[in-house]
Amino acid sequence: MSVTTDPGAAATVAAPGGDTPARGSRPWPVVAALILGLLLGVAAGLLIPRFTHPGNDSAEAGFLRDMSTHHAQAVEMSMLAHANSTNPRIVTLSGDIALTQHGQIGYMQAWLRDWDLSPTGTQPAMAWMPDSAGSVVNGLMPGMATPEQLDSLRKASGNALDVQFLTLMRAHHLGGIHMAQEAIELSDDENIDWLAQTMVSGQQSELALIDSLLKQTQGS
């Protein structure tokens, strides 16, 4: 499937990385909002009625588990940028990404619990997606940063931090969009379709801003 970046078109819950350097108090309002967003996502997920539940090996369950893991890394990277960037537009963007994706983790984990399913499965990552051979490289799903890239981001500052964050998040969004588009095609659950389409639309819009910011930061 081709992945469009047109801004008009559009597992276990991991907390932001413990290795995040603390360079000020700015992240704490976002942390508080993340917690509130998670609670609201859980509540909303529990309140939405369901009459049939996808099974343990279903595409829906696989998508929720894998995307929870995928989102958790985006939250970690965004919190690093939010705490340490001096670019106001990147601070705002990274905060928005962290809040949005942490809230979506709340939905996904609440639905798995509502379906009486474990947040982690026995199948390999991406097994729910047909023709996914080669999608997972060294245990990482499409677009995910390597441990080395994350370590470099944690140590970066100034313009180097901004460029690294935007570059990694761009790849991360492209991988996430691809996964969400596959979920829309494979699932007949209206809630999964709604959430996946929300991810596609939101991340495609963010890609346009990321590309614009990358041009500015790489030219600095």
Image: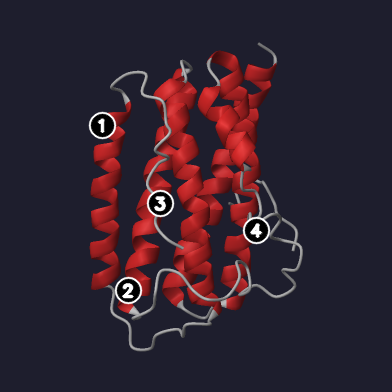
Nearer the camera: disc 1 or disc 4: 1
Q: Secondary structure at mark 1?
A: helix
Residue at position x 59%, y 28% in the image: 152
* Tag 4: amino acid: His
Q: Which residue is identified by label 4?
A: 178
Q: Residue furthest bottom?
A: 52
Q: Earlier in the sequence, mark 2 or mark 1?
A: 1
Q: Residues within 10 Å of mark 4 (few under 14, many from 20)?
A: some
Residue type indicated by callout 1: Pro
Q: Which residue is mark 1?
A: 29
Q: Which numbered disc, 1 or 4, marks the residue that appears first in the sequence?
A: 1
Color scheme of the displayed model: secondary structure
Horizontal relation, residue 113 to residue 131: left or right: left
Q: CA distance from mark 3 to mark 2?
A: 16 Å
* Type of the residue with mark 3: Ala
Residue 113 tag number? 2
Image coordinates of residue 27 in percent, x first then y, are 32, 29
Mark closer to the chain start, 3 or 4: 3
Quadrant of the image containing the N terminus: bottom right
Closer to the camera, 132 or 43? 132
Q: Is residue 46 depicted above or below 101 in this figure?
A: below
Q: Quadrant of residue 92?
A: top left
Q: Which mark is residue 14?
A: 3
**Mark 1 to mark 4 CA distance (whole Å):** 31 Å
Cα–Cα gap, marks 2 and 1 = 28 Å
Ranked by sequence position, the earlier of labels 4 and 2 is 2
Residue 49 figure quarter: bottom left
Going from N to C along the chain, the mark reached first, 3 or 2, is 3
Q: Is residue 81 above or below residue 1?
A: above
Foreground: disc 1 or disc 3: 3
- On the image, the x and y values in percent for residue 89 come to 47, 23
